Image: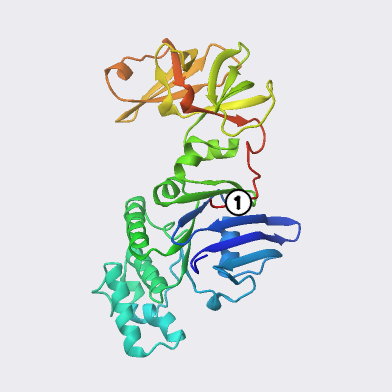
Amino acid sequence: MSSSSLTVQGLAKRYGDFVALAPTDLVVADGEFLTLLGPSGSGKTTLLSLLAGLVPPDEGVVRIGAQDVTYAPPYERDIGVVFQNYALFPHMTIAENIAFPLKMRKIPEAEAKKRAQEALEMVHLPHIAGRYPRELSGGQQQRVALARCMVYKPSIILMDEPLGALDKKLREHMQLEIKHLHRELGTTVVYVTHDQEEAMTMSDRICLMNSGRIEQLGTPADLYFRPRTLFVADFLGESNLLPASLGTRLGDEAEIRLGSAGIPGRALANGLDLPPGSPVRVMVRPQNLSIARPSGDETAVMGRVSDVMVTGSLTKVYMQPLDDALPPLVAAFATRNEAEAIRIDDVMALSWDSRDAVVIADRGPAAMPATTAKAA
């Protein structure tokens, strides 16, 4: 295993009776960009702090490559950390700020200056070496913080909400900058955010956390289109979650019966192992619904349009199913003549292909334990 890979086994942290992080297993591959995503209090920052050595674990092991660093201090871990508040020294010039980690490692002054300038060029700020942090914008300060982190070439970079203080336009620009730097350097990155769009845009894989546990780990597409739990389906993007009963397995699909009327259909089984008749939810994303009569591979729900919203390129249609046991549905269509013709109180059918719907257990995880997720 490369020295830039990261392995966590049974890592846990408690504060009195509060479980900040339940025993957790995680493997981050060499050169991977992994995002820890979740709401406030989900455990993502606690996990990052344990990886950085900022707090000691109550149990478990942290390895960088083959080296056990569970109780090693931060400066012995070959890890760089970037925080939301930048943590730049106000009395030092930008060049001195960037060179500071090299000074602590007793790198000769001439070499430190050279590497600091190279780091500034890497973040496209070669002209500000003599300025002070107070003279820079928020985006420039964040780039300097990145340069300081990268100047000593750590094997792993940890980022804790690094773009949280920036406005939307600048944040999106910095997302592209960080992705570019990651591709250029090939460094292993563990990135913390509560912003789902940021996680979907930047990550090789996402580790979605909830209440101190891993809910699901996988590619952005895995979590978005194949969520394993109701929390994942609801947290990432907009979703329709329909109550149903589980029928017979048909390969990687399962028969379903929707609502009190038992509307027949099929959906991807999503690794679910429950007996027929079990209560489940069927998740369909709004963009996967269409206005059409169902064919052999489609499921349809009749209802009455309750609202229509044109948001520019998309038209959202809200429909109350005629079966009162089903919740309101939302569909998203490209704005065009067909979508523009829909009116409130229209009675219509929304349908979806069986490959665009997934079955989720009505409670808890659908397949894998919530506390354990490993790289393939």
| Residue at image coords 30%, 73% | 120
| Residue at image coords 38%, 65% | 142
Q: How many marks?
A: 1
The residue tagged 1 is: 42
Q: Position of residue 87 (x, y in %)?
A: 45, 71
Q: Position of residue 213 (x, y in %)?
A: 64, 50
Along the line of sight, which residue is nearer the eye, 61 or 283?
61
Q: Quadrant of residue 351?
A: top left
Question: Which element is circle 1 on?
Answer: loop
| Residue at image coords 40%, 87% | 107
Q: Is residue 13 visible?
A: yes
Q: Position of residue 13 (x, y in %)?
A: 68, 61
User: Callout 1: 10 Å neighbours few (<14), some, many (20+)?
Assistant: many
Q: Position of residue 134 (x, y in %)?
A: 35, 73
12 relative to 97 in the view: left or right: right
| Residue at image coords 66%, 37% | 364
Direction left: furthest residue: 127
Along the line of sight, which residue is nearer the eye, 341 or 132?
341
Eyeballing the image, is 149 above or below 373? below
Q: Quadrant of residue 68?
A: bottom right
Three-letter residue code for mark 1? Ser
Q: Is residue 160 visible?
A: no
Direction right: furthest residue: 17
